Image (tube, rainbow, N blue to C red):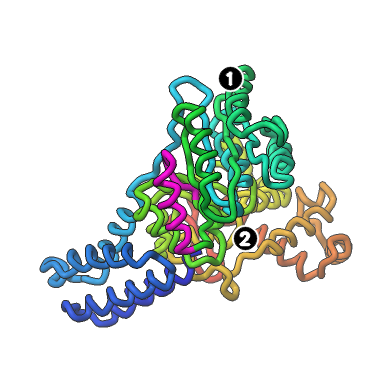
Amino acid sequence: MFEALTEKLQGAFKRLSARGKLGPKEIREGLKEIRVALLEADVAYDVVKGFINRVQQEALGEDILKGLNPTQQIVKIVHAHLVELLGEQAVKIKLASEPPTAIVLAGLQGSGKTTTAGKLAVRLQREGHRPLLVATDVYRPAAIDQLQQIGAQIAVPVFSLGDQKSPVDIAKAALKHAKANGLDIAIIDTAGRLHLDEAMMAEVQQIETALGQPETLLVIDSMTGQDAVNVAREFGQRLHLDGLILTKLDSDARGGAALSARAVSGLPIKFVGTSERPDGLDVFYPDRMAQRILGMGDVLSLVEKAQESISADEAAQLQQKLLSKKFSLEDFRDQLQRVRGMGPLDQLLKMVPGMGSMAGVGDMALEEKELDRVDAVVNSMTPVERKNPDILNASRKRRIARGSGLQVQDVNIVLKEFRQLAQLMESMGSGKPMQIGGMKLGPR
């Protein structure tokens, strides 16, 4: 989402750095570039104006101007104020002292409330909760069916009383059902409209009142740009909002909503939608998002995704296989599938510091078809061949190529990648460095 903004910010910093010693004039010119980049990213004008003023006031300080590397210090200042703009720290869902906790999702039609309800249920389920999805959108055709299909896909129960009961009655009955069945969180999918109107606001207010003090989250489509800010402001004036969820953060939108919504509404961004997958909802960490916007990567999020993908026991078993040189082609395929399970490969690459600009570029492009090739080749082998690839002669490779619908050279590429990874991991496990492509890898 922030690719264009990141590229322009990095360009501005690069030009500042090329000037060597910086004076007030150079800093103002550099900040003007940053200002234009933010406005082009659809960040609200008032937000940009306040942000640039704060950065400029600090950047023009005597210590910065006389520093050995003023550009790096300016980057640090911009990062700090970006974190402040985005909310400084992650904010968790407020759980009720006595379950079940009611989470009301509000927002306009098309903002992604229903799919977000399912993604939120998946995330809460992974955290050890027992969620219930509640269908209160009795107006939109097939809205109830959509939520029931999502619930079946993610194995989460869905509560519905059809489209003849009032949303308020459905919400109250759902909480009773959740309590009776040991479900500790009820995620209530409310009805939306194509635009803000009195009927929608009044209905969500009535649901809030009926449920006491629910956790009310406003779902905003990041692709709506400046309109997202207006939506946050209007809903905030009528509802007791506890936070925001930004959907479609993986889109090609300019990203201004993420930078503006928090500042304009005063509400924390609690979650962001990062893909269309059922697990594509991430906790929003302002500091990590600021790092990604500035092209610094997001190693912590990458580590968390890896930990979710492989357990400590599985990691220990893998390490033992590597040390005993029993790492097979099946293990190779399984580990690549785990990487695929962590999310889109281009997004993972952007979390690595300094690699964000390489995602999708030339030889650095990581594509799903590369993993498909490994799957096809390994699946076309016999169990014996997977465990002992050294027996693969020319005739066996031709058979595997035919079975996988690929060429013999594709089989050779997969085998080469497997051997290089196995050697690298074995050397790292044994504490010995190795040479790959003229580079020494592993411990020094």
Up the image or down, 408 lies above or below 403; here it is below
The disc label shown at residue 370, or none: none
Residue at 33%, 59% (x, y): give it. Answer: 82
Q: Tag 2: residue type?
A: Gln
Residue 266 is a magenta residue: no
Secondary element under disc 2, as helix, strand or loop, is: helix
User: Foreground: 366 or 245?
Assistant: 245
- C-beta proximity under 8 Å, tags 1 and 2: no
Provide residue 156's location: percent of width, then percent of height.
Answer: 67, 33
**Residue identified by numbered label 2:** 420
Q: Give the image quarter of residue 391.
A: bottom right
Numbered tag placed on residue 179 in the rendering: 1
In depth, the one of 80 and 383 nearer the eye is 80
Q: Relative to 409, is 253 on the left or the right?
A: left
Percent position of residue 246, x then y: 50, 52
Going from N to C along the chain, the mark reached first, 1 or 2, is 1
Report the number of numbered marks.
2
Q: Nearer the viewer, residue 388 or 381?
A: 381
Q: Looking at numbered disc 1 in the image, what kind of residue is underneath it? A: Lys
Residue 318 visible? The answer is no
- Which span of residues is magenta-colored? 225-245
3D distance between C-alphas at marks 1 and 2? 54 Å
Main SS class of the magenta portion in the image: helix
Residue in the image at 30% along x and 53% along y:
84
